[in-house]
């Protein structure tokens, strides 16, 4: 599904990536972790086709960058950290239905179904300004899923959420995982992702410094300025977050 081969990328004359290579199979969930400035958000933008590598080759579902960024953008759903930058509709319903033909009964029904599954149905007619931070994040993810992406890219989906919001977000990610939707998720707080991600990638100063399963990567996290999950530190292994 995703293949990066020796990716180098410069942004605003700063070298962001220096030889990143990785491969992710279809249907898996990958967690991107690392300190601030390690390149997590930039890598998501590259995977979404918003940036073009300086050298190396990136492919998503068979489409390559450089060269086929438009095709990559069409099959990817990127949800950025600041929901206000992504919400374009005046109301919840309008945002979920952007680009839909009003006569498209199937599409409209899918938008309503997603609103219900994200606990947004009662807010359908509400202006987006009244939504909480967590509700805005869920609206952005619902809007991305309505377009049926083959790849879902989430930048810090747990940021700013309270406990109930984090539980709801976990339910969304677990449902996507059960549906075999390929997900790449960046996170600082990795506790809620510990039992969701199939693979972990640790970025540090533009390099991929660790890659593998939780059992392979968690013992290395502290050495790369990332706090391991509490359950792991307590010797309990990977446990569902509650």
Image: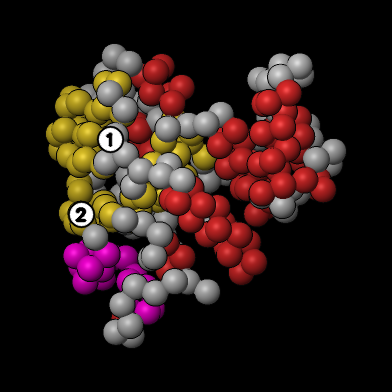
Nearest the viewer among 235 and 179 is 179
Specify the segment rendered in magenta. 214-232
Residue 239 picture location, percent across and down: 39, 74
Q: How is the image coloured?
A: secondary structure
Q: For the point 39% across and 18% down, which residue is it?
A: 71
**Rendered image: mark on residue 62:** none
Q: Is residue 152 visible?
A: yes
Residue 206 picture location, percent across and down: 23, 45
Q: Quadrant of residue 236?
A: bottom left
**Rendered image: mark on residue 211:** 2
- Left or right: residue 232 versus residue 139 is left
Q: Main secondary structure of the magenta part?
A: helix
Q: Is disc 1 placed on a helix, strand or loop?
A: strand
User: Pointer 1: residues within 10 angstroms few (<14), some, or many (20+)?
Assistant: some
Instruction: Say which quadrant the N terminus sits in.
Output: top left
According to the image, label 1 marks what residue? Answer: 2
Q: Quadrant of residue 189?
A: bottom left
State yes or no: residue 40 in magenta.
no
């Amino acid at each position: 599904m995703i293949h990066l081969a020796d990716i180098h990328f410069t942004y605003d004359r700063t070298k962001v990536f220096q030889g990143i290579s990785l491969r992710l199979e279809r249907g898996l969930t990958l967690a991107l972790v690392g300190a601030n400035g390690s390149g997590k958000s930039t890598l998501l933008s590259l995977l979404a086709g918003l940036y073009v590598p300086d050298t190396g080759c990136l492919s998503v579902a068979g489409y390559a960058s450089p060269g086929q960024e438009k095709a990559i953008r069409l099959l990817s759903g990127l949800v950025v950290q600041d929901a206000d930058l992504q919400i374009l509709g005046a109301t919840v319903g309008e945002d979920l239905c952007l680009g839909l033909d009003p006569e498209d009964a199937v599409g409209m029904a899918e938008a309503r179904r997603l609103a219900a599954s994200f606990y947004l149905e009662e807010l359908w007619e509400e202006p987006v300004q009244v939504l909480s931070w967590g509700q805005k994040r869920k609206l952005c993810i619902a809007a991305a899923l309505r377009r049926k992406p083959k790849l879902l890219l989430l930048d810090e989906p747990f940021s700013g959420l309270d406990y109930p919001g984090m539980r709801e977000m976990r339910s969304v990610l677990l449902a996507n995982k059960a549906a075999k939707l390929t997900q790449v998720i960046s996170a600082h707080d990795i506790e809620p992702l510990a039992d969701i991600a199939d693979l972990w990638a640790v970025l540090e100063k533009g390099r991929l410094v660790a890659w593998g399963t939780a059992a392979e990567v968690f013992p290395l996290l502290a050495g790369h300025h990332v706090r391991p999950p509490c359950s792991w530190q307590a010797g309990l292994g990977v446990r569902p977050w509650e």
